[in-house]
Image (cartoon, grey):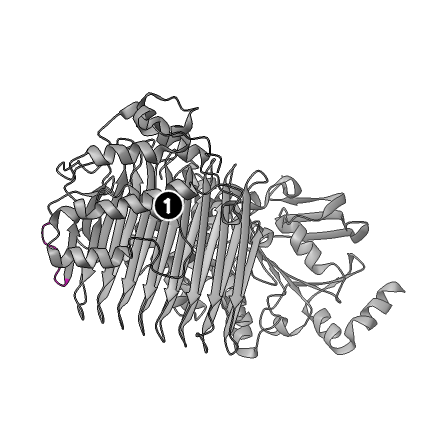
Amino acid sequence: MAQTTVQQGTRDQASAQTSNEPSARRPWLLAAERLRHSASGLDWLADRRAAALARVEHSGLPDTSQEDWRYTSLSGFTQRWADHLVATGPPSVPTGTDSPVPMSATWVTASMFTVDVVDGTLCAPLVGTPPGLTIRSLQQLTPEWQDRVEGLLGPTDGQADSSPPDSLVDLNTALLGDVLLIATDPGSCVNLPIHVRLQGTAAPALGQPRLLVDVGPGSQLTLSLEFTGSAGALVNAVTQVCLGRDSQLNLIRVQALPDDGMLTETTRIEVAESASVTVTSVDLGSQLSRQALTVLLAGTGASATVHGLFLADGHRHIDNRTRLEHQAPLTTSRETFRGIADDHGHGVFNGKIIVQPGAAGSNAALTNRNLLLTTTAEIDTKPELEIYVDDVRCSHGATTGQLDANALFYLRSRGLDPAAARQMLTAAFLRESLNGIAVPELRTRLEARLQARLQAGPGGEA
Amino acid sequence: MNALLQVSGLRVAVGDKEILTGLDLSVRAGEVHAIMGPNGSGKSTLAHVLSGRDGYVVTGGSVSYLGRDLLAMAPEERARAGLFLGFQYPIEIPGVSNIYLLRSALNARRAARGESEIDAASFLRLVKEKARLMQMDESFLQRGVNEGFSGGEKKRNEVFQMAVLEPTLAILDETDSGLDIDALKVVSSGVNSLRNPERAFILVTHYQRLLDYIRPDFVHVLAGGRIIRTGDRTLALELEAGGYDQVLAAASQ
């Protein structure tokens, strides 16, 4: 990062600066300054924010010189944030007192409990929360829940687990305006899928949702997170999930931002003994989306299943990075990731499996299959295995190819025209990844959306 | 009566190699033709070229189907005009259910004839009736096309698709290969039930066995890229008794 020339006093001058000057490269300074002036009433967060801000100042945001960021540049992201900040002026952080109207009605149905979060802030009040479930924002924390939130956020001075420091997590913490806590009581089985709609607008310059999910021992939860928003939405989301012993979580994450939306997303899931998590990740929208998903199999017999799916058409840039870390004996992971790149789209997948010395008897399998529909599209894929113990079974593989000519001919020989045949095969390729979604209604709707998108092309029904 | 299909002097090459070397064949409505021949004689090439598969270059001759130039039609146009190819190696297509494919295929044909889409109830009735005919469990309908099917199930599924699509001309490419005797009976009775005065069949086969169950009107022996002998059902029995060598030797004299 080239920011050594920044001078003292930048914060005071920031609002007057043009995008060529230092604050354009370090918009967090101005954003933090504005946050200090807003009346959040959350003083206990001040130290944590300040420490995180100092780390961001030190490290800067990732750039393409780092191996993990080789294919994805955040320069447009940072530039837009700086431009938004200058254009909107203070205050830039929502106070939680407004209840913005949800922007797009998507999947609100009787068979799901829907929670709306706009620019990181819960649209209160919630009525009829299912039994066994607690949902809180920072404004509604009792001291007991505050301890819980602090525990989930981790130590003030940095990372709780073995993961390397992450400047996007620090950025989220440095500018923490609100937190959404979702917790299940031990032993409870939440009887409705919980659907959280995370809507981003251009209003706060950068939306920074922070989700903390605490799945109590022996409990069961189905949670879907949907990223949507209005034009120009810019979001840096962080989700931390903790699964207690013997618990089960079915997590569905759908990224359906508008065509010019940008998202960076960091998700960490820690799985305790005999607990299991299933993650289904779907990327349908955005101009730029970068997801880093880490699953730590921390307890004996913990297991994780990850199904991923992305559609990088138009000029989308979709980057998914997964890291499944086996830390305890007899842990299991299964990952299948599928991607399609069309038009001028660019898909990136990096899947890493790490088996630590303590994880004897573990079993891991990763497959990545990609489909390139045009010669102008690009997919970069890299599955990686790091194994530090004997007595494990691991496999991985990645393929990138075109639609099968034999299958295309088969469909044409039955009377389908080439476009319909291609679309049918493309949809079929994607649909297989949706099989892991345990909410039939959600799966059906996602299938319909994929179908519509493949018919309409980019910019059509998303 | 005009021929449904008229193949005249057809010459086809793959790369530098000429596979069909001047093939003549005339098929009229209501007829069943068996095309037999040793491996490499060009049987499957003929089936592929008639269905419009890529990779073949027609270097001479013509094919007329229902009075149209078949070779100028795209594969899907041929299908919509009532031509059906039963594949020797049916393709597995995970993620596309049998019933979805059939409905799309049927509606594509209807649209080509200027008809409206079939309604859901009629379609379901039709496929269930045909599934019964082929002794297929209804659960097969919802499964991915040929996904995880055994060899016999795949062939049965081809004939099931044919039964639903009700073609004018069906070309079955080695539909009998890889079938046990029970599956062969089911497939044969499926084909026999579809025989009618408006419909014609071309059975491409290596073995006479299939013809015990489906009685052809004509048997053709294909060798060296053209039909060297044509006869009735007894020709197949002759082939069975004496092998191809004897027939080839006789033909070359």
Disc 1 sits on a residue from what chain? A
Indicate left or right for A155 with B233 as reference.
left
Q: Residue at x 75, y 78 (%)?
A: B241
Count of numbered badges drawn on the protein: 1
Q: Quickly name the residue at label 1.
A: A55
Q: Nearer the viewer, residue A6 or A163?
A: A6
Residue A450 position within the rendered picture, expressed as x and y whole percent measured from the top left: 39, 46
Q: Is residue A43 above or below residue B220?
A: above
Q: Residue at x 73, y 45 (%)?
A: B57
Q: Residue furthest front?
A: A8
Decide whether residue A128 is among the magenta residues: yes
Decide whether residue B98 is among the magenta residues: no
Residue B168 position within the rendered picture, expressed as x and y whole percent measured from the top left: 54, 52
Judge whether residue B147 can be spotted in this image: no
- Neighbour tally class for label 1: few under 14, some 14-19, many 20 plus, Cα within 10 Å: some
* Res A99 quadrant in image: top left
Q: Quadrant of the C terminus of chain A?
A: top left
Q: Nearer the viewer, residue A313 or B144?
A: A313
Q: Read off the magenta span.
A: A126-132
Q: Residue at x 49, y 51 (%)?
A: A349
Residue A176 position within the rendered picture, expressed as x and y whole percent measured from the top left: 25, 43
Judge whether residue B63 can be spotted in this image: yes
Indicate left or right for A456 with A412 as reference.
left
Q: Which element type, helix, strand or loop, lies under badge 1?
A: helix
Indicate left or right for A144 with A211 as reference.
left
Q: Amino acid at mark 1?
A: Arg
Q: Nearer the viewer, residue B94 or A284?
A: A284
Q: Residue furthest right?
A: B253
Residue A63 position within the rendered picture, expressed as x and y whole percent measured from the top left: 48, 41
Q: Is residue A397 above or below residue B62?
A: below
Q: Nearer the viewer, residue B95 or B223?
A: B95
Which secondary structure dominates the residues rendered in magenta?
loop
